[in-house]
Image: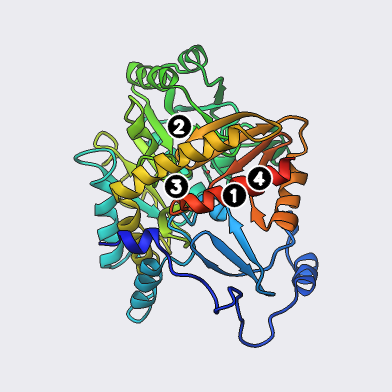
Amino acid sequence: MLHSAILHAPDAGGGDGRMHLPGDPPSLAALQELDAQYTIDTYARHPLDAVRGEGVRLWDAAGEEYLDLLAGISVSNVGHCHPHVVGALTGQAQWLLHASNLVHTAPALQLAERLATHSLGEGSKVFLCNSGAEAVEGALKLARRAKSAGDFVVVRDGFHGRTYGALSATPQEAKQAPFAPLVPGFIVAEPTIEGITSAVTERTAAVLLEPIRGESGVWPVPDEVLIAAREACDRVGAALIFDEIQTGLGRAGTFWRFEATPVVPDVMTSAKALGGGLPIGAIIAGPKYADVLQRGDHGSTFAGSPIIAAAALATLDVLEDEALLSHVRRVGERFREAIATLPRVTEVRGHGLMIGFDIDGGGAPALVERALLEQRMLINATGPQTIRLLPPLIIQDSEIDEAVTRLGDLLR
Ligand SMILES: *Cc1c(COP(=O)(O)O)cnc(C)c1O
């Protein structure tokens, strides 16, 4: 039903292909001034003032068009301003924005049903929240509620978010060190069979990992390591938690990444693309863990608000489409094959449209800046030699050809 709308977003802007803003938007320089003076300086922002998005394109206030190969860090999987999501959002906005979890609201409860019935099997249940880090926090609480005072095993170079529990699960020196002491009880394992097997003990409450480590440069965890983690958790009665915040919702070519592996986790976290561009997260507990958290154990004021849940339901309408998922697998493979032929590229990794590639000689962050200024293209560097691409899943073959040409020009 939605398929043609998904794969053929309408053209943007006026007839000249440029975007025309009403009134007089502030200049980029004025925004940079506000940023310097009034925001706590935690971000190195690109010199781009984004005012409009549609499909795989963004426009700045001057009407310049950009090819977005990052999708707001794997948030806009359905493309910017997908008409079905915008329609659901504006429709719900006429009725009710927020009512709290002290009452029943249809969008949140229908969203819980959709996620529970399309994830970890019969008997799964969902806790909605507002972001990825919050989903991780809740999943950690859930695992410790199931195994009192237990330890958490996490893997080297994993990323799970910036709040204290999620940060404690993110063993990266630069991110953790300034904020010590962290939450106790986290054990760091190498992402190998031996590493995980030896880290898991009778005291382990959970093993938490990303099936493809995203922030550290798109490193798929091999199937045999996932199997070892599953077996280790079963041996000691610990929960296997997959952080699918980045890998899920079609990004890696299946609806959840675990579906392409031989392993089913006990608990999953989701966020990023779930709201079609709006903030939301979810803990999905499989049948064994669905009834661990009790009334009063956890909560969140905004979680599952009607407006966000309505957008998430519309987002799932688009993403739960086998035709779209097979499109992601096909164009993702094409994209990776084309990138592998470009100059300076030494390795290409990933699944579906979660793509990382290494470049000879380093300088990836400078390349990202040049991509923006010279090629009008948003890409991302996860380190000095690694570029990461997370384009909207609706990206077309012609847009991939365009991206490959621009990447080639950049690398030559
Ligand atoms: C982005 C991300 C998070 C954190 O999500 P936020 O919404 O930024 O808190 C956690 N885990 C993974 C794997 C992520 O990619």
Report the residue that reaches farthest toward the bottom.
23
**What is the number of the mark on residue 225?**
none
Judge whether residue 38 can be spotted in this image: yes
Q: Marks 1 and 2, Cα distance to the nearest angstrom?
A: 27 Å
**Comparing labels 4 and 2, the label whose residue is closer to the camera:** 4
Instruction: Please say if the residues under marks 3 and 4 sit with CB atoms less than 8 Å apart.
Output: no
* Residue situated in front as seen by the camera: 74 or 286: 74
* Residue situated in front as seen by the camera: 146 or 368: 368
**What is the number of the mark on residue 407?**
4
Residue 317 placement, left or right of 353: left
Q: Secondary structure at mark 1?
A: helix
Q: Marks 1 and 4, Cα distance to the nearest angstrom?
A: 6 Å
| Residue, disc 2 | 211
Queried on whether the Cβ of the residue with tag 3 lies below 8 angstroms from ligand 1, the answer reads: yes
Q: Secondary structure at mark 4?
A: helix
The amino acid pointed to by label 3 is Ala
Q: Which of the two labelled residues, at mark 1 and mark 2, occupies the earlier sequence position?
A: 2
Q: Which of the two labelled residues, at mark 2 and mark 3, occupies the earlier sequence position?
A: 3
Judge whether residue 98 can be spotted in this image: no
Residue 179 placement, left or right of 95: right
Q: Which of the two labelled residues, at mark 4 and mark 2, occupies the earlier sequence position?
A: 2
* Residue situated in front as seen by the camera: 117 or 134: 117
